[in-house]
Image (cartoon, grey):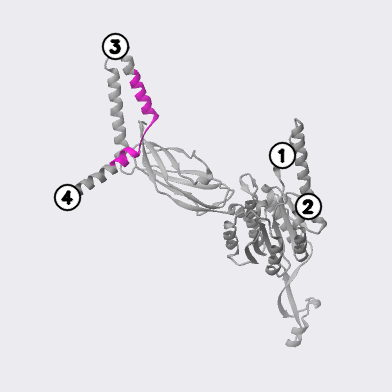
Amino acid sequence: MRYQDSLTALTRTLKVLFTQYYVNLFLKNRLFAGLGLSSVLFVLSFFFPWLGAIPLLFFLTLLALVAIDILLLYRVGNGIFARRDSPDRLSNGDDNNLGIHIESFYSFPVGAGVIDEIPFQFQQRNIWFKVDLKPRETRIISYQLRPFKRGEYEFGKIHVYVHSPLGLLRRRYSFDESETLPVYPSFLQMRKYELLAISNRLSETGIKRLRRLGHSMEFEHIKNYVSGDDYRSVNWKATARKGDLMVNSFTDEKSQHVYCIIDKSRSMKMPFDGLSLLDYAINASLVLSNIALLKEDKAGLITISEKIGAVIQADRRPTQLNQIMEVLFKEKTRYLETNMELLYSTIRSTAKQRSLMVFFTNFESMSAMERQLPFLKRIARFHLLFVVFFENTELQKLKEAPARNVEEIYIQTIAAKFANEKKQIVKELARHGIQSILSTPQQLTVNTINKYLEVKARQGV
């Protein structure tokens, strides 16, 4: 029994030594260069006897330096500490700042190469940071990642490869910094526009500031009549009950209902600059909902494909924006056509009063729009409807590129036809009293906010 325990302990010790001194030990190019030079000297010594013992002395010196290098790297048990500094969540389509905190406990300067096992979704295999550390120095390596898809991203270990001033060997330290970070709709973009809205600097980003037209009022409370009050606001029923002249008090209407309707059908799968049209619509919806809440309106959300996805009734609760963000985080493109009849019935049952409906969709042809037009006209009868769809920037590039042969002339003509059809869709919608926004994906957020602010200025809802 004692023999078996001793054998187990020896096996465990050998395993630890193997892991520390073999698995985590790597040879550098400088050592290979030294071994190559040593081999050349041994070969030359056969042709030049006067070299004598120089090749052997060089080889022994190299071995001694290797032994010293191992001693320098391993005489400190834990010579390096590293951890990842990451946010709680990442913002889709934006540059997210991350950092690696690295600290040296060696008593001499060392060089280090750092590898962070980033999620496979980024498809980056060249994450290698070089850093020089002085004795007991702490450094922070900063870098950025830009995700193009919502979901959960799994980060792995941090590997630090350390070498001494001799630079013959590297020792690897591995730190288990595994974590899963969710990628949410672009909350960084949302915060940017939020700050601009609070400081009234929206016009600096190309967002219009319009003169307020019209006058809209909502009931606040009943009060006693005082000299100067508008006699047209006298509440005769309250006056009869109270026995004194009572008037209605009104305030500017603020709690307008703003619904973002997101089409999740196959037409929204098309990618532009890494993001799908659905993600552009989601990011714009989040920003618009936040701006609406800041303007004291009520924000709501409806997602639709062949069936209804999520329905959030317009409200101004403190948790409303978080609820919208959590729903948008989970939305995915589906591959069937939008059920417009179901959308119409959902809007009728959800929005009981006249609201601003911003419908994010995409039309690639006039026939696609005409299939949805009867239901869009019904929605526009009860609500102020804006149809937001996308301009194909690739078609613009094809149309503007110089044609060098007959095939390119044909391609250019087809591209011009499709681009012109998008403009015809805008005119056709306007002919039926439906307002629309034809926008490039990159300008979608700005153009949508422009329309919303225009509605706020004109009090059209």
Residue lying at the far right in this picture: please name it: 431
Callout 3 secondary element: helix
Image position, residue 192 (x, y; %)? 61, 52
Q: CA distance from mark 3 to mark 4?
A: 60 Å
Residue 397: give its label.
Answer: 1
Callout 2 secondary element: helix
Q: What residue sits right under mark 2 in the picture?
A: 426
Q: What residue sits right under mark 3 in the picture?
A: 50
Callout 1, which amino acid?
A: Lys
- Are the two marked residues, 2 and 3, in contact with CB atoms closer than 8 angstroms? no
- Mark 2 or mark 4, whichever is nearer to me: 4
| Residue 295, quarter of the rendered image | bottom right
- Mark 1 or mark 4, whichever is nearer to me: 4
Callout 4, which amino acid?
A: Arg
- Mark 2 or mark 3, whichever is nearer to me: 2
The residue located at (32%, 37%) in the rendering is 22
Mark sitting earlier along the chain (3/4): 4
| Residue 59 versus residue 187 in the image, above or below | above
Mark sitting earlier along the chain (2/3): 3
Drawn side of residue 405 relative to residue 13, left or right? right
Callout 4 secondary element: helix
Q: CA distance from mark 2 to mark 3?
A: 91 Å
Q: What residue sits right under mark 4 in the picture?
A: 2
Drawn side of residue 179 relative to residue 71, left or right? right
- Are the two marked residues, 1 and 2, in contact with CB atoms closer than 8 angstroms? no
Drawn side of residue 115 relative to residue 66, left or right? right
